Image (cartoon, rainbow, N blue to C red):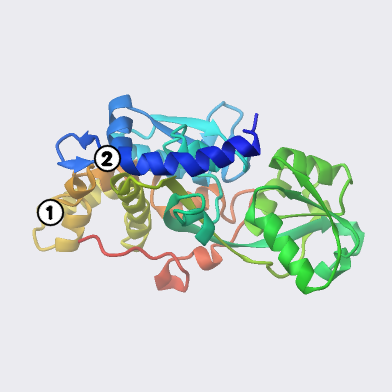
């Protein structure tokens, strides 16, 4: 059940202040670093990861009872990097209105739930989150019934539009319709399940969310071809994982595990060849970049409070960024997404890792 708004507000205001005092108080064994969250995850032997849980392609429960999806694999990558075991994850389903309180209260260690990075969510005076690297570049869109005849946003003037409250999409829709001087009737729901159920029941003529998320939801509709996404984006929607503010060591660990996925793809290191690449690095002292990246030389893992071979463990567990994308969202899946801006920077996209040195 979602927390009452008043409780969420109190948690979001109070917990970051306490966290700033408390999160630096626990030593991470063998590193000399101070991190309450990283020390707690290691002591518990399990990562608690907040996800949507009902979004095909991103995070959902498969028929065999296992969580699957792009953002699920990001959780498993973090577990592999921290605990050397991608299976040591407890997934926690969270609604949009619950997710930030769950991070700041410590209910989850990591939020991997299609969350847009914004100033107010990042700022200490706002939701006080610490965001990881942007792992998915998207934009907001609108979906309508293919037989409705609607092709533009302005044609939705005076009509009901379904939207999940507590999201950037709710605010962006209001901004765009105001710019068009088009009054509309927002039908607001507490969670995505209610939002899409109302849309399919015909209570609204359109529904809005991130374009990729709409495509993912549409794939689970009884007749996906009966629904179309209007051309044009309403906003920028850069998605990133998030951790509690006030624990920079934990935030760094999550950040560089994510970058490892991106750098591995750029370097041509895959789930299938990572062991061979490691052997190659060990055998050739002249491959400085590869040896450092895979933990043969240097102290990059120690600087993060992670094992020296954390990159190897991550890639063995999930594959690189491109493999994760293609497996869960790509053109050979029912989501059928092109990489687009989520291609590597060397291929004209925006996926870019800072140097591992």
* Quadrant of the rendering where the N terminus is positioned: top right
Q: Nearer the viewer, residue 115 or 292?
A: 115
Name the image quarter holding residue 306: top left
Crowd tier of the residue under label 2, counting other residues whose Cα lies within 10 Å: few below 14, some 14–19, many 20 or above: many
Q: Specify which label sits upstream in the sequence, 2 or 1.
A: 2
Q: Can residue 118 be seen at all in this image of the molecule?
A: no
Q: Horizontal placement of 295 versus 333: left or right?
A: left
Task: Name which residue lies at 10% across and 63% down.
Answer: 286
Residue at 62 percent of width and 33 percent of height: 3
Q: Position of residue 21 (x, y in %)?
A: 32, 41
To which residue does mark 2 refer?
Answer: 35
Q: Position of residue 344 (x, y in %)?
A: 43, 66
Left or right of 352 on screen, residue 349: right
Instruction: Determine the secondary structure under disc 1.
Output: loop
Is residue 12 depicted above or below 181 in this figure? above
Image side of residue 55 versus residue 82, left or right: right
The quadrant the C terminus occupies is bottom left
Foreground: 182 or 23? Answer: 23
Question: Which label number is shown at residue 298?
Answer: 1
Quick one: SS at disc 2?
Answer: loop
């Amino acid at each position: 059940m979602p927390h009452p708004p008043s409780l969420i507000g109190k948690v979001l205001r109070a917990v970051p202040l306490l966290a700033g005092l408390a999160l630096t108080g626990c030593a991470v064994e063998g590193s000399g670093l101070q991190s309450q969250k990283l020390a707690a995850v290691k002591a518990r032997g399990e990562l608690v990861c907040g996800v949507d849980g009902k979004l095909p392609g991103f995070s959902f429960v498969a028929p065999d009872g296992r969580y699957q999806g792009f953002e699920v694999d990001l959780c498993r990558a973090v577990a592999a990097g921290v605990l050397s075991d991608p299976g040591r994850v407890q997934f926690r389903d969270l609604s949009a209105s619950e997710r930030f309180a769950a991070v700041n209260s410590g209910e989850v260690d990591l939020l991997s739930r299609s969350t847009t990075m914004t100033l107010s969510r990042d700022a200490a005076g706002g939701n006080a989150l610490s965001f990881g690297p942007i792992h998915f570049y998207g934009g907001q869109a609108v979906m309508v019934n293919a037989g409705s005849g609607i092709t533009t946003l302005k044609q939705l003037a005076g009509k009901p539009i379904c939207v999940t409250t507590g999201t950037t999409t709710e605010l962006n829709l209001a901004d765009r319709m105001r710019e068009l001087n088009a009054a509309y009737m927002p039908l607001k729901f507490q969670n995505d399940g209610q939002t899409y159920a109302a849309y399919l029941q015909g209570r609204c003529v359109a529904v809005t969310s991130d374009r990729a998320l709409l495509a993912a939801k549409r794939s689970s509709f009884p007749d996906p071809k009966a629904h179309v996404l209007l051309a044009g984006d309403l906003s920028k929607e850069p998605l990133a994982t998030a951790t509690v503010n006030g624990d920079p060591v934990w935030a760094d660990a999550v950040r560089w595990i994510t970058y490892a996925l991106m750098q591995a793809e750029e370097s041509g290191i895959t789930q299938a060849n990572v062991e061979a690449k490691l052997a190659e690095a060990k055998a050739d002292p002249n491959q400085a970049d590869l040896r450092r990246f895979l933990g043969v030389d240097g102290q990059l893992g120690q600087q993060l409070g992670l094992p020296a071979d954390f990159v190897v463990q991550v890639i063995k567990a999930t594959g690189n960024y491109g493999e994760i994308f293609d497996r869960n969202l790509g053109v050979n899946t029912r989501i059928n997404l092109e990489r687009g801006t989520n291609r590597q920077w060397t291929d004209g996209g925006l996926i870019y890792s800072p140097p591992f040195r």
